[in-house]
Image: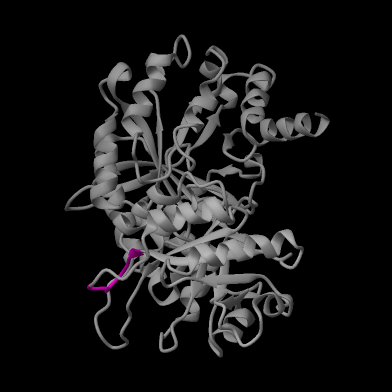
Amino acid sequence: MSSSSFFPEHKRPVPQALSLLPTGIKLDFKSLKALGPSLDLLQQLTKDGKVQRPVWINADILRGPNVPISIEVNATQFLALVQEKYPEATVSPGWTTLYVPLFPNSTYTRAMVEKMQALVGALPQRVTFPVRAVMLRAAWPHFSWLLGQSDRYSLTLWQGASDPVSVDDLLYIRDNCAIHQIYYDLFEPVLSQFKQLAMNATRKRSYYTGGSLIPLLQLPRGDGLSVMWLVPDIQGNGTTATVQFPDKEGMILLNVGLQELAAGDPVPIVRAPGGPVLTLESCLLQLATHPGRWGIHLHIAEPTALRPSLAMLAHLSTLGQLRWPVWVGTTVSHGSFAVPGHVAGKELLTAVSEVFPHVTVAPGWPEEVLGSGYGQQLLTDMLELCQGLWQPVSFQLQAGPLGQSMAGVVARLLAASPRATVTVKYSSAEGSYASVQTVLLAARAVDRTRVYYRLPQSYREDLLADVGRN
C-alpha cells in the first residue's frame, strides 16, 4: 500500500498524484479536520475513474499501550464519516502506542481489544487493525480472539523506526493465522530476514494452545471432515511407559484420569484402551519430540483430574513444550443436565480461567439425559453456561441422540459465537455407520468448516465417500 496524507498541499495535484501510484492507497489521518473533505474528493475521483485501487482509511481511534494522554481521533466521528462518504474503503482503526527500547513497556490488553471490537463489530466493510509488531506476541491471545470474531478482519503489523522486532515473533504470528489475515509494514533488514525464513518449509513451527485448528490441521474455510481424531498406543506402565503416535496427523485424543504412582500427590495420567497408563507429563513431552502436525484433545474422564491436568499444561507451556492447539473437554453437569459424578459446568470454566486459560473448551452432556435427544432446555442451559466465554468452545455431540433431536441443534450451537464449533462423535460399539449416516450428512450440511467428526476410521472413510458422491 502507498501512504498519502491526501492534503491539497501535495507537490503534485491530488488526482495526478493518485494516478501515479502503482499500488493500493492507504490514507492515514491524524485528525478529523481533513477527513471529510478528503473523503469527498476521494469519492469524486472514484466516480471519475481516477481511483481504481483498494483504499484503506486509517486512524488511531483508541488509546493504546504506554500512552499517558488522550491523543486518539474521535472513534464515533471517524467511523461515521467513513460510512457516510466512502463506505467502499477498508477501515483501518488502530490504537495510539508508545514504545521505548530498553525501558519497561506494556502491551495491548484484553480490554483494549474488546473495546475495539465493540466499536467496529457491526461495520459492513473489511477491517484491518494496525498493530505494533514489537508488542504483538505478548498480546497474541487477545488478537487471536479478535481475528476469530469475523472473517472480514485482518491485522497489519507495523514497525516503528527503532523497534527491535523479533523475526521469531513474526513467524509465530504467521503460523497462527491464515495467510490472508496478516499484512506487513516492516523495515529492512527485518522484512527480508522474515521473508526468507517464512518460505522455509522445514522450519520448526509453534502454535498457540488456545488457537483454532486452522491453519495447522485445516485449510482456511476448509472441511472439518479433513481433521482426524487419533488415539496413541501406550506400551508399558507408569514412569517407564512409552507412547507410539499414529503415522497420520490430526487431533491426539487422551483420556485423562488421576493416579498416585509414588509417594506424593496424585498425578494426571493417560489411560489407553486395554489398561496401560502413562503420566500426562511424559506423554506430552514425548509428543513434543515427535515430528508432525498435531492438536491435543484432553478428555477429563475423572473430575478430580481437571485442575492437575490444567496445571500440567500451564507448566509445560511455560517451558515451551506445548506447541499445538489444546482442547480440554469433559462431560459436564449443569442446570437441566445436572448429574452427579460429572464435572460441574461452572467448575470447568472456572478452573480453565484460573489455571490455564489458553485452551479450547470442549463440554459435553451426560448420557443419562440424552434418552430423547438434545432437547431445547438442554441446549439453552449449555449455551447459558458458555455465554460470554473468552475461549473457543467445541460442543461435543453424540451422533445417536443427535438423530433423535429436532432439527436445528447444530445451527443453534454454532450461532453462539463466531468461534464456536461442534464435534459429532460416534463409536463402532454404538452401531453401524448406516445407522448415523443421515445424521452425519445433515450436520455437515449446516457448516462444512465448523463441524468436526470423532469417528472410527472406516466410518470416516464411508462419510468421505458419501460426501464425494453428493
- Image check: 416 left or right of 311? right
In percent of the image, x 48 and y 59: which residue is there?
Answer: 287
Q: Is residue 63 magenta?
A: yes
Residue drawn at x 56%, y 27% as measured from the top left: 426
The secondary structure that most of the magenta stretch takes on is: loop
Residue 51 horizontal/vertical position (percent): 71, 66
User: Is 236 placed left or right of 114 in the picture?
Assistant: right
Q: Report the number of numbered marks.
A: 0
Residue 327 seen anywhere in this rendered image of the structure: yes
Closest to the observer, 172 or 270: 172
Residue drawn at (61%, 86%), measured in percent from left and top?
A: 192
The image shows residue 237, relative to residue 275, as above or below, that is below
| Vertical arrangement, residue 264 with respect to residue 427, above or below | below
| Image quarter (top left, top right, bottom left or bottom right) of the N terminus | bottom right
Residue at the left extreme of this rendering:
264
Q: In the rendering, at what x and y percent does residue 430 appear? A: 56, 20
Q: Quadrant of the C terminus?
A: top right
Near-viewer residue (405 or 317):
405
Magenta span: 62-68
Query: Looking at the picture, how far across and down is residue 279, in whole percent?
Result: 35, 52
| Nearer to us in this view, 386 or 339 | 386
> Image quarter for residue 69?
bottom left
Q: Is residue 238 magenta?
A: no
